[in-house]
Every structure is written in C-alpha cells, then in structure tokens.
Image (spheres, rainbow, N blue to C red):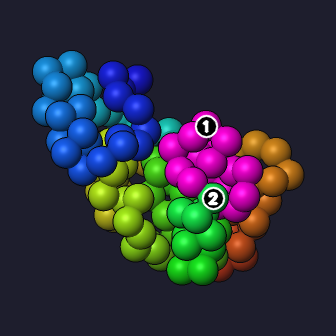
Amino acid sequence: MLPAPLMADSRAERKQWCNHRLYRIVDALSENADVAFIGIGNIGINCSLHEDGFITTAEVEEMMQAGAVAELLGLLIDAQGARVQSTTGERVTSLRLDAPPKRPTIGFADGLRKREAVVPRCRVNGCRGW
C-alpha cells in the first residue's frame, strides 16, 4: 500500500506525497515485483472516485465527455483501453505501470457498475478467466 491518497488535491501536493521517504521505498520495492495486481474502476456519476471525494461531478462529466469508461490506478482509459487525458491525471499519486508491462499484470473488478469498464476492453483484446 502506498502511504498516499490515490489523488492529491493539487500537482504541488502530489509532488510532496511522491517525494515522501515511505512512498519512495514502496516505489523501489515495486520494481522487483514478480506480478502486478491492479483494480479497474468505472467512470460515471457516483463511481468510486466520485463517491470517495477525489473528483467532483464536473470532473466526472469532463471525463465522460473525453470518452473515459474506466480507470486503472486513477488513470483514465476509453473502451479500447487507450489512455484518456484529463486534468485529474496530473494529481494521481499511484505508481506508474510500464507499457508494455515488464511483468504479468492482472486487472480485477467487481460489481455490475464496473461492467462497462471491463466488457468493452475484453471484446477488443480478449479476456482469460471468464
């Protein structure tokens, strides 16, 4: 677990969180991980980021207008899995994933409201374990 919120209130605050000694330790340890597990969240009104107070209703609407259907570690993706740029991306404190990944990377999601975050991606790229 990172000793930081998923999303800081500003870019300056993000910089402070990411420069914290404990954050840097976790970041260094993650480089040696054999596998990565990441949660997949949906984007929409009352999505987890919205309910937890990380983003406002206006930001959710902006994300949806930009084509975002899901988030991985707070970073937005569209139905084809491509990154969607947003102003909130500058505040995300999560560790960055390599593209392409250097290690097996397993995404997981639960619940009907995350269906649109997962199903379109699987139709495009195929999914194992369904």
Instruction: Identify which amino acid the numbered label 2 is placed on.
Output: Thr
**Element under label 1?**
loop
Left or right? Give the position of 77 relative to 34.
right
* 24 and 108: which is toward the camera: 24
Residue 113 place in picture, x, y as percent: 81, 53
First along the sequence among labels 1 and 2: 1
Q: Residue at x 16, y 25 (%)?
A: 20
Residue 55 inside the magenta-drawn segment = yes
Residue count near mark 1 (Cα–Cα under 10 Å), binned few <14, some 14–19, many ≥20: few
Q: CA distance from mark 1 to mark 2?
A: 12 Å
Instruction: Identify which amino acid the numbered label 1 is placed on.
Output: Asp
Residue that badge 2 annotates: 57
* Placement of 11 over or under 31, stated as above or below: below
* Placement of 57 over or under 16, stated as above or below: below
Give residue 29's mark: none
Left or right? Give the position of 48 relative to 53.
right
Q: Are marks 1 and 2 in contact (CB under 8 Å)?
A: no
**Element under label 2?**
helix
Residue that badge 1 annotates: 52
Residue 52 place in picture, x, y as percent: 61, 37
Q: Residue at x 36, y 48 (%)?
A: 92
Residue count near mark 2 (Cα–Cα under 10 Å), binned few <14, some 14–19, many ≥20: some
* 49 and 40: which is toward the camera: 49
* Placement of 127 over or under 93, stated as above or below: below
User: Image quarter for residue 121?
Assistant: bottom right
* Span shown in magenta: 41-56
